[in-house]
Amino acid sequence: MDILSTTILLFLILDPLGNIPIFLSYLEKSKSRYKILARELVLALVILYVFLFFGRQFLSALNLKQEAVAISGAIILFIIAIRMIFPSSKQYGDEEIDGDPLLVPLAIPLVAGPSILATLILLVSQYPDKLMDFSIALFIAWFISAIILFSATALQNYLGKRGLIAIERLMGMVLIAIAVQMFLDAIRAFITDVL
């Protein structure tokens, strides 16, 4: 995978447009909204880089094969994409909170969620020689997501709730296609390895 395709994949999984209503609900009463948002985004970026650089060693310690990680990563992506297209009625941000959020739920799991973490481990497992490309792609995807989340109020006012939902569902459809391709590639690699 090249930097552009990896950036697009990671951006789709980060799903900043789908996170806009949740971030706004958590930060609407905060006096230091942008400071909290910046802190949560930086914490999420640190966690993402930890998984990018050390996730492969974690899998090696668990003695997991690359094909197993690829198939499970594709399944996770598929489930996330289905949730983007058919969201449940209960979302993060529906519950009342006291005080400003710290790490949970904005940094984890909304930005650095299980799907993006599994994808980073999967990418490094499949293409260990492209770690620097993935580092660049991750930063670009995170940076674009950060810009979108910082302009969340303006985007929600401009696109409206229906516009945001339509874009998120379109992103979910693209992500389903990527997940299916990853699944097929993993099955093909498994069959080739067995034969």
Image (tube, rainbow, N blue to C red):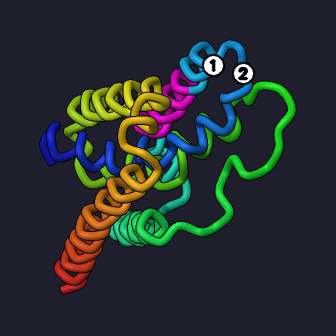
- Foreground: 121 or 113? 113
Residue found at x 43% / y 41%: 16
At which x and y percent is residue 186? 26, 72
Residue found at x 57% / y 23%: 37
- Foreground: 41 or 138? 41
- Magenta includes 91? no
- Foreground: 59 or 146? 146
Q: Which residue is mark 1?
A: 33
Position of residue 66 relative to residue 129, above or below, is below
Residue found at x 67% / y 29%: 28
Q: Which residue is mark 2?
A: 30
- Quarter residue 170 falls in: bottom left
Task: Please say if the residues under marks 1 and 2 sit with CB atoms less than 8 Å apart.
Answer: yes
Residue found at x 67% / y 51%: 92
- The reply, left or right, for residue 103 in relation to residue 74 is right
Q: Amino acid at mark 1?
A: Arg
- Foreground: 87 or 81? 87
Position of residue 193 relative to residue 117, above or below, is below
Read off the magenta span: 41-54
Q: Is residue 20 visible?
A: yes
Q: Main secondary structure of the magenta part?
A: helix
At which x and y percent is residue 153? 49, 30
Q: Amino acid at mark 2?
A: Ser
